[in-house]
Amino acid sequence: MREFYDVIIIGGGNAGFGVSAIAHEAGKSIAFIEARDFGGTCPNRGCTPKKVLVAAAHAMHEIEQAAIHGIDVSKPRLDWAKLIQRENDLIGFIPDAMHGLAEKRGDVFRGTARFVGPNSVEVDGQVIRGQNIVIATGSKPRPLPIPGAEHMITSDEVLSDPTLPRDVVFIGGGVIAMEFSHVYARAGVQVTILEALPQLLPRLDSDAVAALRAETERLGVVVKTGVWVTAIEKTADGLNVRFQHEGRDQSVTAERVVNGAGRIANIDGLNLEAGGVDHDGLRILIDDTMRSTSNPSVWVAGDAIAHSAQLSPVATYEGQIVGHNIVNGPTKKPDYSVIPSAVYTVPALSSVGLTEAEARDRGLDVAVTVSDMSGWFSAKTYAETAAWSKVLVDQINDRIVGAHILGHHGDELIHLFAMAMRHGVPANELRTSLYAFPTFAADIKSLI
């Protein structure tokens, strides 16, 4: 193996592979450093295995609604151990496959990397040097300064434990809590969500989140916002979570307590000072080309960037931009204005663009169309328990600036809104286009 590389990539996830695809095609020498499993969080411990559980929740939901369609089904039971085994069977090949791809593109080093100089990193006692070093180390669960926090588990354990708990408390009402609560609830688990802020999913449109909260509570999930958790204590009955809510001291006991407070950039242990990489403890300081502001040899991509959305496609996108800037010079900048995303509850909450509050804050003159579709023929045909949308249109130029959909196959329809936004298609074009009927997409003309 070499001692000097054109590109050293710290992290074998989506961002790292995005960089390597561009650099490898340009003939650059590449070193991959990975401390855990190739592929990173999304395919191994995140979005991919999670969707296996979500698919099971969808099946349970369909069975629960079967009687509306005249189908007589006995009470279903989800075999949690078999579901976890199915998840493992579906994703088990990924680390080796991604490792093999890394080896085709460059040299692979296994272990934890740390800077020992501006252009040097050490891994497993070996020092290698690079003209460019890319930090693509992903994210990690946000630590919570709560007495007894060591008793909490993370999404990693939720996805790997074959034993279904009797009851669960999520501390934090972010994406992890919302998605897993919908899976757990349909498996018969009593779920409680405790969120410190006034709103679940605080980055999303408040009305859309309110609609999702109502559907979540319909499932029997207990949701409390504006909560201050004071302690987690192990007792003979399980784990007792003590908290303050609406001016009163309260508590709830559960078999498991899950950290649902989201994730932060995984940059601990990189010894950034030795690399001359400025940071504030939580984020690496970068310019608008994703290059370190203090060391021009260092780049950052993926969840290791603190300010961009922690989404797998975004990580790949950022990695490709970094790869381009390494090969061709720092000429490309990421555009985060149109990023479709979904919270994979059942049904999913999908979004793209601005929330209504963000649009108002920017001074935009927006027409806001809110639709409760639960009474529409399309929703009633499929016995949707929640079907809601909000679409924002800039009245000056007739362009869509935001769309938010709960249910109604919104996790697919959101891409039509995203395409219209990215390519400047006027809202009226979507309104007057022809759609196959009857489909959920045919309702788009009535959502705007």
Image (spheres, grey):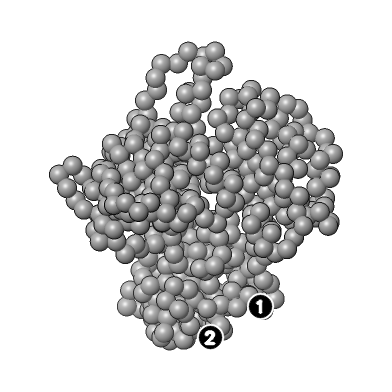
Q: Which of marks 2 and 1 is in front?
A: 2
Q: How far apart are marks 2 and 1 (CA)?
A: 15 Å
In the image, residue 243 lies at what x, y percent?
A: 31, 53
From the viewer's perspective, is residue 237 above or below residue 6? above
Q: Is residue 2 visible?
A: yes
Instruction: Give the secondary structure at mark 1.
Output: loop
Q: Residues within 10 Å of mark 2 (few under 14, many from 20)?
A: some
Image quarter hosting the N terminus: bottom left
Image quarter hosting the C terminus: top right
Residue 402: image tag: none
* Kind of residue at disc 2: Ser
Q: Earlier in the sequence, mark 2 or mark 1?
A: 2
Residue 294: image tag: 2
Tag 2–tag 1 contact (CB < 8 Å): no
Residue 330: image tag: 1
Along the line of sight, which residue is nearer the eye, 19 or 135? Answer: 135
